[in-house]
Image (cartoon, helix red, strand yellow):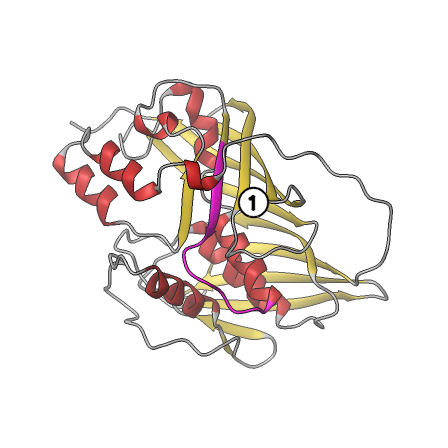
Amino acid sequence: MLLTIPALPRHGAVMTDSNPEQRVAALLRTLDLESGAADTFVGHNHPDGRGRMFGGQVIAQALVAAERTVDEDRPVHSLHAYFLRGGDETRDVDFQVMRDLDGGSFANRRVVVSQADVPILTMLASFHRREPGRHHASAMPDVPPPEDLLEEAALRTAFAETLAPDKRELLLRLRRPIEMRSVEPQQWLTREPTAPLSHTWIRAAAPLPDDPRIHRAVLAYASDLRLLGTSMLPHGLGLIEGNVMAASLDHALWFHDDFRADEWLLYVCDSPWAGGARGFNRGAIYTRDGRHVASVAQEGLVRPIAPKA
């Protein structure tokens, strides 16, 4: 067990509680996988009422499963995942880990994630024993601090006023365990076409335990937020508006340095290309003191559709 989490309802609940500690406890519970035989694990969902599992959750759980089979002196440095099918948030999730490599410096794990014996995600993860080396890093952009920005709840409320009642209810009831503050709030309020670039401060909505594996898993969860939407920014597309069919196809994440996921991190996303009903997105994650601690890349389905009448 990673840690002890208070019991929470497993099925049928919507994460509407405004208490951030409870939301983070629910996230940690989904990451606290049950161990089975021969490197197998079972994960439980905390449904939020959307029916489909959040992709970042599946990636984070798969990372937890892989890390359970690797010595702690070899932290993960990269993962590469493919989304095969949408996950059902009312079902448990099965994880099978294959130990492909245990070398002198590196270890490699392959994870197959399934529901009802049907694969929904495959992931490769690489682990590296710490060693010294030459260093350089990209500089963090100069942006306003999170204290000067609107809380996401305020943005949601303002945006909800522009929506039909059914869409308004869906937007307002969603409560995430990740706190986000956008440097460009107009991108999410107006949906007017803008450059495919966004800057968002993110952190866990409540303090986390000190285990660095938990912080890596929480960042893996959060790395699937905001990313795919960046490729929609120049085109005025959005899921709430119902004018696009969107889904993550793959996801890559590189861990460069240590961090805490319950302290503010700047998530810089850009999309250098979109076409053929796909959008490609990149992300860079910085600590508040300017360290470049992680990088992300993702391609997703971005298929424009006619909104339902």
Residue with the most extreme front position? 148
Magenta range:
199-211
Q: Position of residue 170 (x, y in %)?
A: 22, 44
In front of the other: 93 or 223: 223
Q: Which residue is mark 1?
A: 251
Tell me which residue sits at (66%, 57%) in the image: 125
In front of the other: 178 or 246: 178
Q: Can residue 274 be seen here?
A: yes
Q: Is residue 56 left or right of residue 23?
A: right
Residue 156: quadrant of the picture: top left
In front of the other: 300 or 297: 297
Count of numbered tags? 1
Q: Residues within 10 Å of mark 1 (few under 14, many from 20)?
A: many
Secondary structure under the numbered disc 1 in the rendered image: strand
Height in image: 299 above or below 44? above
Q: Quadrant of the C terminus?
A: top left
Q: Position of residue 255 (x, y in %)?
A: 66, 51
Q: State yes or no: residue 54 in magenta.
A: no
Tell me which residue sits at (45%, 32%) in the image: 183
Name which residue type carries label 1. Answer: His
Height in image: 6 above or below 137? below
Tell me which residue sits at (35%, 52%) in the image: 176
Q: Position of residue 166 (x, y in %)?
A: 15, 39
Q: Can residue 121 be seen here?
A: no
Q: Is residue 57 left or right of residue 47?
A: right
Q: Position of residue 32 (x, y in %)?
A: 47, 72
